[in-house]
Image (cartoon, rainbow, N blue to C red):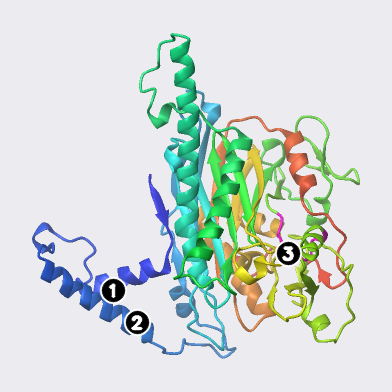
Amino acid sequence: MGCTQSTQQHEEDLSVTERVMGGRRGIDKSERIHSKSEKEKIAAKRSKALAQAADDKTPPKLNDAGHLVAEEVVKRIMGSVQSKETILGDVKSGNGEDLIHVRYAALSQRGYYPDDPHKENQDDYYICGSKFGAGEGDAFFAVFDGHGDKGHDCARFAKNRLPSILAAKIKKQRAALNAKKIKTMTENKQEKPKNAFHPSSWPYLDAKEYENVCRQAHIQCNNEMHDEKKVKDFLSGTTAISVGFHAGRMTVSNVGDSRAVLGYRVGGVGLEGTPAEEEKKEISSEGDSELVDANGVKYEPGSIIAIPLSDDQTPYRRDERTRLEKAGARIRTIDQLEGRKPIDENMNDFNLGVDIDEEGDMPRVYCQDHNYPGTAFSRSLGDTIAEDIGVNGEPEILTKRVTKGDEILVIASDGVFEFLTNQRMIDICAACDDPLHACTKLLEASYEQWLSYELRTDDITCIVLFLQSGKADDTAEVSRIMNKAQNGPKSPKMKTISFPSTGYLSK
């Protein structure tokens, strides 16, 4: 199984090619184009059809409420047509416990803006289901959420370059480790194993080594974006949330406010019952398979709980505010900037993933003497101006060994979780029979919530993985990760929303 990349342009190209070739995706040998002139004619027709499609400004169909009709919504969705399967982990060990059986799928829905109904989807995603960086049991999944006038270009650039840079760095480092190993064996007059120089024989990177190449890849990608003349990232950029699988571990790299969330089954028993979102604070371990919160409330074996594997990098976070202000940034909400509310330098933190921003007036990042750039995130790829005041492309990284309790992994842009809590996302996925079904339900639930709060809808993108591993759970590691998540006090303007068990998804 090789690498696949999402791209809206690819879908449009395919549609045009179908029209040019009479709707036939498969071309018989006698129909293949051989001469240069024939290729040029087809290319000209294809370019003309693409230009006509780009110029098509027919308004989308709306219902009486002013929302897109169902057929218009479907037109805006692209991605997987079926769930795919792969086997990750240490595939050469011969030990079944070292294998991770994975099913995955991805979907992306273009947002709807009444004042710009033809706005391009600024989300993008990348999937390499196996052999990423020449590793037999390695994979890489990423979501990019562009912003600004050229956000779609920034997201596409990151999608094309970040995986390539990372794969090259992984191969180079593993090859160097292998060369060192071979040199030692030669010096000690040891017999070299068969295929000693083949990538399948290369040593794995340890957790720190893999994290280092991830960090280097993001920084290099950010610098290359700045240098690329075709990408105007002066006031545009993209988030980047990714999960790399290597040596039985998953490493999450995060730049911005997209998110990765794990659905973890306590004790791996499979009983019904999901804990309340508020109970997921300051989790500690007690026994081999028991999780207990700070109030002594236990998570029942079989419960699937949402564990954030990334922290949204926004000015809501006290540590990020401090870092930005040291770099010369000014943190203000729009109401504070316009004088409608007093300036509060010690604005409250809140628990990201639990609380929903109903007012939408989040703190933003500005230059000291100018009312720009006004980013609602504290890190990104691109955003040249914002980089001068601390908005940089260095990722926060977390590594976890994949174990039996790790059942669901959601990687998504903020279009998904803007109005859905982490736990709600995992509950939706847990009720589905395969990843594509889960992606569909996440899009439906997210879209419905957007319409409940806004006249517009953001781009909505998610990758869902269903995991199955034989490795025993490490409750201490789970507790460490959960304790690392943001657990600041709730802001007065934030509200935790409860969702009914029936409704849109059961229709």
85 left or right of 21? right
Residue identifier under label 3:
314
Is 169 left or right of 451, judged from the image as shown?
A: left
| Alpha carbons under labels 3 and 1: distance apart | 40 Å
Q: Quadrant of the N terminus?
A: top left
- As measured in the structure, the alpha-carbon distance from the residue carrying label 2 to the one carrying label 3 is 37 Å
Q: Position of residue 144 (x, y in %)?
A: 55, 62
- The residue type indicated by label 1 comes to Val
Q: Which residues are magenta?
A: 311-318
Residue at 81% of width from left, 57% of height from top?
319
Q: Earlier in the sequence, mark 2 or mark 3?
A: 2
First of labels 3, 1 by sequence position = 1
* Nearest the eye: 333 or 409: 333
Tell me residue 428's x, y (percent).
63, 58
User: Do callouts 3 and 1 mark residues in contact (Cβ within 8 Å)?
Assistant: no
**Does the magenta stretch mainly form a helix, a strand or a loop?**
loop
Answer yes or no: do the residues labelled 2 and 1 have beta carbons within 8 Å?
A: yes
Of helix, strand and loop, which one carries label 1? helix
Q: Name which residue lies at 88% across and 77% down.
A: 343
Query: Which residue is labeled 2 in the image?
Result: 53
Report how far apart the C-alphas of labels 2 and 1 lie in the structure: 9 Å
SS class, disc 2: helix
* Kind of residue at badge 3: Thr
Q: Amino acid at mark 2?
A: Ala
Label 1 belongs to which residue? Answer: 16
